[in-house]
Amino acid sequence: MNIKIKVKHLVLLVLLPLTLLGTGLALRFTAASTAADVPPSSAVQTMEREELLAELASSTGTKRMELIRSKVIDPGITGSPYHFDVYIGSGSSQWSDGSEGTASPLLPEDKIALLKEYVLEGPSDYALPNAVKQLVYELDTAGKGSEADALIAAAAERVSSNSQLGGQLTLLRAGRALNSGDLALASRLTPDAAWTGDMELLAEAAWLRGRVLFAAGKSSEALKLVGEALVSYRGQQAAFEASVSPGAAGDATDSGAGTAAPEHSSPAEDKLTALQTAMRQAAGMGLLGSARIEGTLQRSDGTPVARAGVFLRAESEIYHSVHYGDEPYQTVTDENGHYSFSNVIPGFYQLQLGLSFEQIDGWTWPAGSDEWLELDQGAQLTEDITLQPLLELKSPVNSEVVTGPSVTFEWEPVQSAAYYKLWGGVSSEGSSYSVPIHQYIQDTETTVSAEQLYSASGFSTTSSYTAESRFPDPDDPDSWQATDPSSLLSFADPESRFSWYIEAYDADGNVITRSNGYRLNEDTVGNLPFFYYKERTLTAADRLVKERKLAEAVEAYRQDVAADPQDSHALKMLVHLLLAKSSRTKDPQVEEEAIRLLVKLVELQPARESAGYLSYHYYKQADWENYNRYYDVFLSQVPDQPGRYPDSTHASALMFQGQTEAALEAFAADTAADRSHRYIGSYLAAELQAGASLEAALELAQRYPEHSYGHSGYRWPLLLQELQAERAADPASFDRELQARLDQYWGGQKEAVQQWAEAGEPSALKSFMTAVLEVN
Amino acid sequence: MDNERDTIRRRLEEELEGMAFSGAERVLKQTHPGSRGERLQAWWNKELEIPLRPLGACAAVILLGAILILAPHGKSGKEQTAAPSGVRELIQAGGNTYWKDLYEQAVRRVEH
């Protein structure tokens, strides 16, 4: 029997599958034969590298250039050179999804040689600027910044300076001159106002010119230029968007919205806006010229971390993630881990790092979110960054089941740690949260009683919903029933798996290292930070909470409390549920009942969280007798620093009760300890009330800048400077008015202050008092 | 009617006057390949007659070999950890960030 088959069918259906099968087998054997400790990926990479280099060696002329473009330059474009696996900021960390391009098999020196060849001999086409950017990046990481500058200049000579390409290269050169501190060269290279280019290049040119002008001390000229550039850029962008989608604009008008289409801000616009904000703030504080910062990124054992991204991020820009490749101040560490930024607009900044998974695996950069760099006019700051190895947990770990009246947590000691802080984590399908359990632990172990653990989460709640439950509508009075069961039961659920982590602090209160971080290979995974605490069993009411039948659970706990008034768990759960309910329904009767029961609970079991909740409740009501009673209970339950708990709310409470001296002492202690300085406004108001001069208050405001979302660290100093200016006109009447308003404020008449501030002509004093009223 | 058609034709001619089709050669090259290409095409579509029995035996031997060699060897755990980072998924658990496969493996090890 014979079959008839066309050649093409034979090839496609028979020979091709057979070839693929054969290749699969060959690869399998290659992988199996490589040494066990060498990851296959690196072996494959070495092979790919050799193949690619051989392919390149065998080609010449145009073909070779095409090969460099397609194999080296183009694959590098998908991710900007400044694209990293992990971005770590002060108190934050984010990772990219890893799908951005594939790693090149070439070594940095291969890339440098090939890119240099393309830049100097290749065609002056679209790939040239990309080749230059990648070459510059590679040379910078190799510590050959000046060679990079020379190569950009050489590439620029190969293209017309009026072309788009020439423009890009000129701006790149000027930007590098500015960042390296060569203001004269930057000034010479930065195109003047008559320069033409597309809108993106014009925006970039204006950004550079603004920085050059500001660095040269011409702040008002710089601000004018940047302001005009922004107007022009936005105009061009709006015209472009209208031309792309005229229909959309028409619809908006038809529907009567009357407003422009949603704004799409671009990196170029963001950069200009950020520069404008930074220059305005600096100029407002009388800071002219520029600052410089440099440092070294290394591991705690002194090994430098090379090829890491370093981003200097202004206070106003810290709340959005890094713009890949378009950050105003971005650089990469050289082989000694060194980085630097010159001609930085004075202001408050934070550093952020871009690292690879391999670089961060098992290590942490313990920078707190409240750590700010103040770059003053003319400052030359050195800020070294040290990565620390993650701390290791000892017990309870690896999902160990703990029983008994307490849990003992144990971890490996950290050299030079003055104390440790223990955090506990609760997670459910929908949410997870961590709460501090013990602070100021001087040993490498601590024992936490069941009661402490059960009450550690306090009375806050999170909402979540499952596939069965509806998405909670905030207006729905029943929406409190979407409260997440795990946030109610927290550590009192014997079926739930808990986690924990440790932070190690030095004597000055800086975090040295922590146990939680990136653990990405078998050696760094270490002990899993999980445990179960099966000391109690779930009651019928607890089951109702777990089944999300919260209204029924309230009734069940009520019955439990009626049956046994000493049942602190049922009482606590009842309070928690009622507080969750009252926070959504705003029903004063429910809150009243919750507070009444909470008073009982504190009598039964004076936990820190319960007493703290009650004292704050009475603080808001200005019920000082009850406030003082529960604040004392709270203090007696703070095991870490009894009697010395820095607390600005308490300082304010003392002020409201007329105990000025004690209040000022408490404010001073808390403001020095709390790096966010979020209560500085109250502290200033207290100092002024006590008779401090505006000069003294200004000094205080400058020493303790408040960093909060939407506000600059210069906000309070600026407000005080405006007060000084206002006072100068008529000191006597100003002082009288200031004293009267402060008396009203600390006398508990906040509404009266508010009404006065909102009425009539605005003034510096009104702005100041409004800011004081907003302190929270 | 004819008059109208004429007008339209004239206008069309006027408008198209500035346009010239210069790709004729390239198109022809594509639609009428040279003799070498034609020969290749003919070979590609050529019909072969193959005896089925030896072919079947041959296929059976290859298939058996492939199954024996490619059958799992019970070492999949090790291979999982060697997956390239591009296809792995990161997760957060207990405050840490892990590769999902490595994490699940570690959890399986401690929670039987």
Image (spheres, coloured by chain):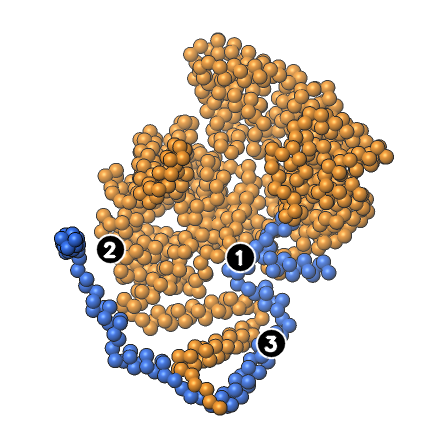
Identify the chain of the residue marked 1, using the numbered disc in the image.
A
Q: Mark 3 against mark 1, which lies toward the viewer? A: 3
Q: In the rendered image of this protein, does residue A373 appear above or below residue B44? A: above
Rendered orange, the chain in question is: A
- Type of the residue with mark 3: Ala
Q: In the rendered image of this protein, does residue B88 appear above or below residue A540? A: below
Mark 3 = which residue?
Answer: B71
Is the residue under label 1 in contact with that under label 3 (CB below 8 Å)?
Answer: no
Please say whether residue A436 is visible from this viewpoint.
no
Q: How many marks?
A: 3
Q: Image quadrant for the C terminus of chain A? A: top right
Is the residue under label 2 in contact with that under label 1 (CB below 8 Å)?
Answer: no
Farthest residue, direction front = B1
Identify the chain of the residue marked 2, using the numbered disc in the image.
A
Direction from residue A284 to residue A501 in the image, left or right:
right
Rendered blue, the chain in question is: B
- Is disc 1 placed on a helix, strand or loop? helix
Mark 2 = which residue?
Answer: A158
Q: CA distance from mark 3 to mark 2?
A: 59 Å
Mark 1 = which residue?
Answer: A358
Q: CA distance from mark 1 to mark 2?
A: 39 Å
- Type of the residue with mark 2: Arg
Direction from residue B19 to residue A316 in the image, left or right:
right
The x and y percentages for residue A584 are: 64, 32
